[in-house]
Amino acid sequence: MYTTIIILLILSTTTTAIATISSDITALKAIKSSINPATIPSYTCLHSWDFTSDPCSPPHVTHFLCGLSCSGKRVTQLTLDPAGYSGTLPPIISQLTQLITIDLSDNRFHGQIPNSLFSLPNLQTLILAGNSFSGVIPPAITNLRKIQTLDISHNALSGSLPKTLASLTELTRLDLSFNQVTGPIPVLPKNLIQVALKANSLSGDLQKQSFTESSQLEVIEVSQNSLTGTIPGWFFLTPSLQQINLSNNSFTRFQILKPVNSSLVAVNLGFNKLSGYLPATFSAYPMLASFTLSYNNLKGRIPWEYTKLPRLFLDGNLFIGLPPKDFFSRKTFIISGSLGDNCLKSCPAWSKLCFKSQKPCSVCQKAYRSGKLESKS
Ligand SMILES: *[C@@H]1O[C@H](CO)[C@@H](O)[C@H](O)[C@H]1NC(C)=O
Ligand SMILES: *[C@@H]1O[C@H](CO)[C@@H](O)[C@H](O)[C@H]1NC(C)=O
Ligand SMILES: *[C@@H]1O[C@H](CO)[C@@H](O)[C@H](O)[C@H]1NC(C)=O
């Protein structure tokens, strides 16, 4: 009898204790009501958000089945299902000050990302990928002092990035791919491991200051932009760097320095405007396994040292001479690659490396003739 009363008392006090604080409830209500109800089908998380019951109080049998998590009385995670919700994100979201995670990916949110979002003091994960957010990248982004993962890829953001992201000291993964971001690559923060800025309109050349802080950087994906100038030798020596994708930009030259402690595995410099000769030094990078230089204006012979690379794409350049014999011997490691669409003498048609035919003689003669003129003048 007494035990039952005590249990009931405990139960009722815990329920009261958990009741979500009212400012969090107000914010959640505002978030739901800024979404077009026609885009909230009955099987979705948001449909189960019924404010006749308390968002943070368990058990969630019929209401608040998903889309948020709490710690005590506070909402800590806002992770909506990719149901195609269409709406804007109201600034009042910043009232959810205990939020650690926001994931609204693959919906149809549009309009600006509210500036107030960047004042959330505890935010570690912000994923807004695959929506239609527009407007310029807010400078306030540098206020996310605890952010670890920032993914706003596949939206319609424009404008340039702040000059430096150095204040984002916890950030390990940054993805702004597939937007309309302009301007140069900013100073990257010191604990960044992966940066993806693919398919934007970034311009300018690679500045040393962008990379000096980020000694943990393993992956750089900035293909399909408008970067120009020389790819400097130091760039390939950025400590920790394993994968580089600079394809589909407008780089005109590249320099290779002798490797020091390099962990570089894959480099793609295809579809640029690179001219000059192929340096044998690149093959000295001890971990390098995949190298792509397809569709540039590179000339001269292919150094025999390159035969040790398992993946090698040199197609669409102006390479001349006989390709190194080892490319075609059974002992070589080449698993995939291409030497096609060059000016090579006798690339054996039976080898898949020579699948694409070589350029017509006239094209090659013209390229080398104008080259000589260039070097004389
Ligand atoms: C590099 O970027 C190009 C163009 O965006 C893409 O086709 C390629 O798959 C990327 N990755 C690698 C490893 O080359
Ligand atoms: C890269 O650029 C080439 C030439 O401009 C283009 O044909 C190709 O589709 C581009 N690749 C990607 C992945 O955008
Ligand atoms: C090479 O790497 C090792 C281990 O990571 C480190 O101790 C050493 O200082 C590095 N050497 C140079 C020249 O960077």
Image: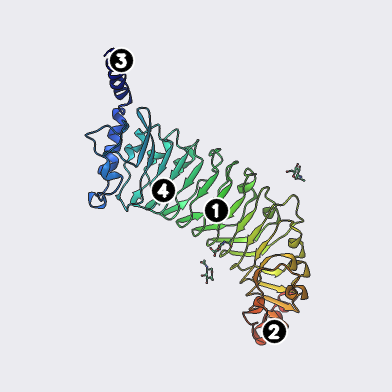
Location of residue 161 with respect to 76 vertically, above or below: below
Q: Amino acid at mark 2?
A: Gln
Residue 250 % position (x, y): 58, 65
Where residue 48 appears, as percent x and y from the top left, is: 27, 42
Task: Say if mark 2 contacts mark 3, CB within 8 Å.
Answer: no
Q: Is residue 355 above or below residue 100?
A: below
User: Which amino acid does the dot numbered 1 rest on?
Assistant: Pro
Give the alpha-carbon distance from disc 1 to disc 3, as whole Å.
69 Å
> Of callouts 4 and 2, which one flags the residue occurring earlier in the amino acid sequence?
4
Figure quadrant of the N terminus: top left
Crowdedness near tag 4: few (<14), some (14–19) or many (≥20) residues, C-alpha within 10 Å: many
Q: Nearer the viewer, mark 1 or mark 3?
A: 3
Between circles 1 and 4, the one closer to the viewer is 4
Q: Is residue 34 visible?
A: no
Tag on residue 102?
none
Q: What's the CA distance linking mark 2 and mark 1? A: 38 Å
Q: CA distance from mark 1 to mark 4?
A: 23 Å
For label 2, the residue is 365
Q: Which mark is residue 128?
A: 4
Q: Nearer the viewer, residue 153 or 347?
A: 347
What residue did someone put label 3 on?
Answer: 3
Q: Give the amino acid at mark 3.
A: Thr
Q: Secondary structure at mark 1?
A: loop
